[in-house]
Image: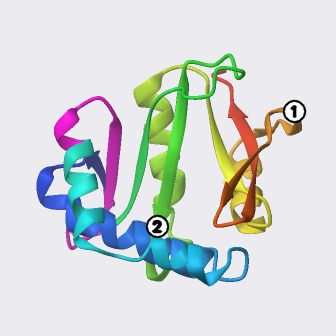
Amino acid sequence: MKIRYAELFDVFSIAKIHCESWQQTYANLIPQQILQKRAFSKEKVLRWENRIKEKKYIILVAENDEGIVTGFVWGGKARDEKIHLNFELYALYIAESEQNRGYGSALLKAFAKEVNDDFYLFALQGNQRAKNFYLKKGGILKPEYAKKQEDDGFVLKEDCFCFLKV
């Protein structure tokens, strides 16, 4: 296993993992019309290309022993002003076929090392697997920071987990 900064040649893999993870992870939590908007597309690949080119984010990938990207983490400056931490982990996704092999733990640890500070993340309510993972890794569930957003008339509710540097 290797964790490294994402390069432009990784954009297809990152976009594919991101979109497929949404389809698989949230199939029973989010209506299909919302998931369809998150389907793999050229635009998604271009969005990841732009994020990497901007160089204002922390985007790390995990590779297996064959050099194939198996997951990624993306984060940067905090976006929620009511949470008084400097950094936010925006996304952490592992290809379904590569889950439970330590990639998520390694990416989370690498992100924490990169920011070298407290950070938070949001996870969709009902995603029990993510909740269990973040709690097991030291995340502190902060119900006071839970948030809601509407998409096509459907309310998405997210829980906030804070990771405090020890």
Query: Does 47 appear above or below 143?
Result: below
Position of 103 with respect to 45 (left or right) is right
- For the point 27% across and 43% down, which residue is it? 51
Position of 131 with respect to 10 (left or right) is right
Q: Which of 38 and 100 lies nearest the eye of the viewer?
A: 38
Which quadrant holds residue 1?
A: bottom left
Query: Mark 1 = which residue?
Result: 144
* Location of residue 132 in the rendering, given as x and y in whole percent from the top left corner: 77, 59
SS state under label 1 = helix
Q: Provide the residue span drawn in magenta.
A: 52-69
Position of 109 with respect to 150 (left or right) is left
Identify residue type, mark 2: Ile
Q: Gap between marks 1 and 2, in whole Å? A: 28 Å
Characterize the local packing of mark 1: few (<14), some (14-19) or many (20 or more) Cα atoms within 10 angstroms: few
Q: Residue furthest left?
A: 9
Identify residue type, mark 1: Glu
* Location of residue 156 in the rendering, given as x and y in whole percent from the top left corner: 72, 59
